[in-house]
Image: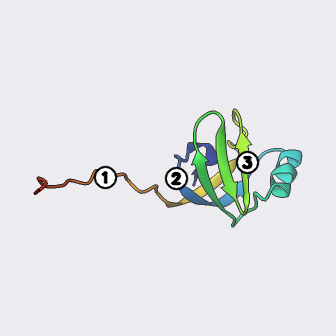
Amino acid sequence: MIPLQLLNAGETAEIAMIGGETALVTRLNEMGFREGEVVHMVRSGEPCIVAVGNHRLTFRGNETAHIFVNLLSHPPHSSATVTGARED
């Protein structure tokens, strides 16, 4: 289990726990962040963009530090295509 803010762009995870003050937990729940929901890190860094359900949300600072997730997938690695010599 890791904080959501540590996900890299392209990674998908399942929300395992939301901590923090009651008001914060309630606010996150209202935005769709609930235990068991799958989230996708669209853009990591500052600010980060997280997709949950049909929504994309932007977070700044440590706003995602209280959302703990279990990693489901890593982003695909880009690989260069190697081609042979071209025949004319």
Q: What residue is rendered at 78% in x and 59% in y? A: 32
Q: What element carries label 1?
A: loop
Toward which corner of the image does residue 55 lie, by quadrant? bottom right
Q: What residue type is labelled 3?
A: Leu
Q: Which of marks 1 and 2 is nearer the N terminus?
A: 2
Spatial distance from mark 2 to mark 3, Cα to Cα?
15 Å
Q: Position of residue 47 (x, y in %)?
A: 66, 35
Q: What residue is rendered at 11% in x and 56% in y? A: 88
Q: Which of marks 1 and 3 is nearer the N terminus?
A: 3
Q: What element carries label 3?
A: strand
Q: Which mark is residue 33?
A: none
Q: In which quarter of the image is the N terminus?
A: bottom right
Q: Where is residue 69 in the image (x, y as percent from the top left)?
A: 61, 56
Please state if 62 lies on the left or on the right of 88 as rendered.
right
Q: Where is residue 87 in the image (x, y as percent from the top left)?
A: 10, 57
Task: Name the residue beneath numbered marker 2.
Answer: 10
Q: What residue type is labelled 2?
A: Gly
Q: What residue type is labelled 1?
A: Ser
Query: Around disc 3, counting alpha carbons within 10 Å, would you say few (fewer than 14), some (14 to 19), or many (20 or more)?
Result: few
State yes or no: discs 1 and 2 in contact (Cβ < 8 Å).
Answer: no
State yes or no: discs 1 and 3 in contact (Cβ < 8 Å).
Answer: no
Q: Which of marks 2 and 3 is nearer the N terminus?
A: 2
Q: Position of residue 13 (x, y in %)?
A: 58, 59
Spatial distance from mark 1 to mark 2, Cα to Cα?
15 Å
The answer to whether any part of residue 2 appears in the image is yes
Task: Name the residue beneath numbered marker 1.
Answer: 79
Q: What residue is rendered at 70% in x and 58% in y? A: 52
Task: Name the residue beneath numbered marker 3.
Answer: 57
